[in-house]
Amino acid sequence: MKRIVFMAFLILLATSFSATAVEFAEVGGPNPDVPSFVGYAPNRIVVKFDSSTLRGLDKAAMASGRTGLPALDQVGTRHGVRSLRPQFPGAKKKSYKGKVVDLSGWHEVEFAGRVDVLSAVEHYKAIPGVLDAQPVGIHKVNIEPKDYNYINPPFQWHLPQIQAPQAWDVVTGNPDII
C-alpha cells in the first residue's frame, strides 16, 4: 500500500512540475546534434570581456545594468539590461595542461524582460573589448535506471504506463524510506 501511495505521489509531483517548468525562448527548432536542447533563457546571456575592458568596468554601477563604458552601456540600454555580474566571482588565471584558463572575464547579463537573445549576443560581440557572448542554453535532463529488468521489456512494462520515467526526473527516491 505504501508503495502505491508513493508512486501516486511521484506521478502527481511529475505532472505538477511540468506545469511550472522553467520558461525558455524557443529558437530555431530541435537540434538533432543536441537532442536535449529545448531553447535559450529568454532574459540573460553571458559575455566575456578582455582584461582592459574588465579594468574599465564600474563595478558599483553593474548591479543596475550600467558599466561606465559608453559602447557597452549603449547596447545595454538598447536591450534593457537590468544587471551585470561576474559569472565566476573571484576567479583567477590558472594553467591547465599547458593552457591558461581565465574565467574572470565572464559576466552574466540579465535583461529586464524577454529579449531576442541571439540579437543581443551579436550586438555584444560587435563591441571592441568583448571576446565572446553566448546565449544561455536550456537542456532536458532525463533519468532512467540502469536496471536490466527495466531496460529489457516486457519485465517492467507498467512503469512507462504510469509515467514513472517522468517522475524519476523530479525525484529518484529516498534510501531511508522502507
Image (spheres, rainbow, N blue to C red):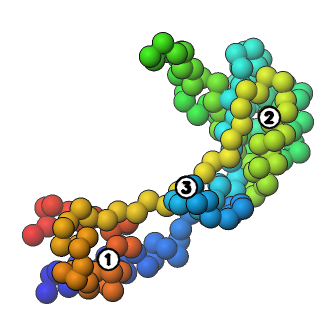
Of the residues under marks 1 and 2, which one precedes in the sequence? 2
Instruction: Tell me where residue 5 sits by quadrant.
Output: bottom left
Q: Determine which residue is flagged by label 2.
A: 125
Q: Work out whether 67 lies above or below 146.
A: above
Q: Nearer the viewer, mark 1 or mark 3?
A: 3
**Mark 1 falls on what kind of element?**
helix
**Mark 3 falls on what kind of element?**
loop
Q: Residue 44: horizontal and vertical position, in percent? A: 68, 48
Of the residues under marks 3 and 2, which one precedes in the sequence? 3
Q: Are marks 1 and 3 in contact (CB under 8 Å)?
A: no
**Left or right of residue 64: residue 148:** left
**Left or right of residue 133: residue 78:** right
Q: Residue 134: horizontal and vertical position, in percent? A: 68, 41
In the rendered structure, which amino acid carries the disc numbered 1? Answer: Ala
Give the crowd class for mark 2: few <14, some 14-19, many >=20 residues within 10 Å: some
| Rendered residue at 54%/30% (across/down) | 88
Q: Work out whether 10 lies above or below 74.
A: below
Q: Are marks 1 and 2 in contact (CB under 8 Å)?
A: no
Cα separation between marks 1 and 3: 24 Å
In the rendered structure, which amino acid carries the disc numbered 3? Answer: Val
Give the crowd class for mark 3: few <14, some 14-19, many >=20 residues within 10 Å: few
**Mark 2 falls on what kind of element?**
helix
| Rendered residue at 26%/85% (across/down) | 158
Instruction: Tell me where residue 11 sits by quadrant.
Output: bottom left
**Left or right of residue 3: residue 106:** right
From where the camera sits, is residue 135 visible? yes
Cα separation between marks 3 and 2: 24 Å
Q: Determine which residue is flagged by label 1.
A: 164
Q: Determine which residue is flagged by label 3.
A: 34
Q: Residue 37: horizontal and vertical position, in percent? A: 57, 58
